[in-house]
Amino acid sequence: MTVTTQTAPAADPLKPVTKDGGSLVEKILRMRSLGILGALVVLIAVTAATNSSFLSGQSVRDLLLAASIIAVLAVGQTVVMITKNIDLSVGSVLGLSAFAAGSVMKAGSPIVLGILAGIVVGTLCGVFNALLVRYGGVPALVVTLGTMYIFRGIAFFWAGGEQITADEMPGSFLDLGTASVLGLPVLVIVAVIALVGAGIYLGRYRSGRDLYAIGSNGQSAELAGISVGKRTLGAFAFSGAMAGIAGVMFAARFGTVDAAAGTGYELNVIAACVVGGVAVVGGVGTVWGAALGALLLTTINSSLPVLQIDQFWQQAIVGALILIAIAADRIAAVRAAQQLRKRSAHVE
């Protein structure tokens, strides 16, 4: 009679375990989230002490609406960055999707078709990025830098120097930009749904966890049987779809759309992700942290003018936050490597 013994599965070397059993990376991300929340509370408190109207109902509403569009873009960007890629075209995709949605509704089509048009255009742009990255053999940074200008050029060609104004879009669509449900703006609810859906997918589904494996080590992920190409295609398509939804939200909120819509958004989105703990080297980060980063940066942009701080310092503060976040990622990587060496020495 043969007796078989079953050994416990080996610990994931990419997630060194701390004394209380938690992942070092997860602990650092939690600490960063607490730091962002602390900075957010202090910033709001100081601004409200300077100008009490900052916490008025309308001010808070405007802040949440502004953050919701960036947060939706950040959700898509997070999924891409986790795979060790980056999408610089999200601002241009937002503008093209917003103009597509506005154009369809301007032609007299139902609101649903206009919304679908924006999402479909965004998704197609994301798929186009994915195909170039996967089969072009060119880094995503370079590819999306090029498509950023291509998509923006298409928007300018389509617009022909004109813009779609509020009186050319259905009033019921524009109401989505101002309507509330139980006191919460509809656009904020859309952002929360996108955030929760992506968070659950990344945290609880195997295909979502595969994205982290790809970002940590693409070759090892492929050897483990993960379809790197398929997952990368899905990540970019999802980012494009999120940019399409953000474009529809942009059109509903502002009511006026032209070819320049969303210009510069890509930098704010990447900054929100990095500040929120999404590593530029891939494999680390959550949509929850990216959303907190989006809220913090939006609050900074709203608070500093109230505090009468020059715009230069607004940009300098955001840049400093990015550098601090990158430094934190580096420290986490060094500590993880040290713990891996200690564990290896102990096993030997």
Image (cartoon, rainbow, N blue to C red):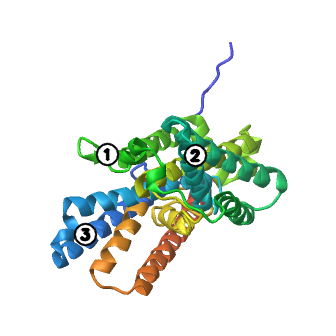
Residue 5 numbered tag: none
Residue depth check, mark 1 versus mark 3: number of the one nearer the observer: 1
* 20, 177: nearer the viewer: 177
Tell me the kind of residue under disc 1: Ala
Label 3 Cα crowd, 10 Å radius (few <14 / some 14-19 / many 20+): some
Amino acid type at circle 3 is Ile
Check the picture and name the quadrant holding the N terminus: top right
Q: Residue at x 25, y 69 (%)?
A: 44
* Quadrant in which residue 95 is drawn: bottom right
* Residue at mark 2: 118
16 vs 260, nearest the viewer: 260
Q: CA distance from mark 1 to mark 2?
A: 20 Å
Asked whether residue 171 appears in the rendered view, the answer is yes
Element under label 1? loop
Q: Residue 20: where, in percent of width, then height?
A: 39, 51
**Which residue position holds label 1?**
179
Residue topped by disc 3: 44
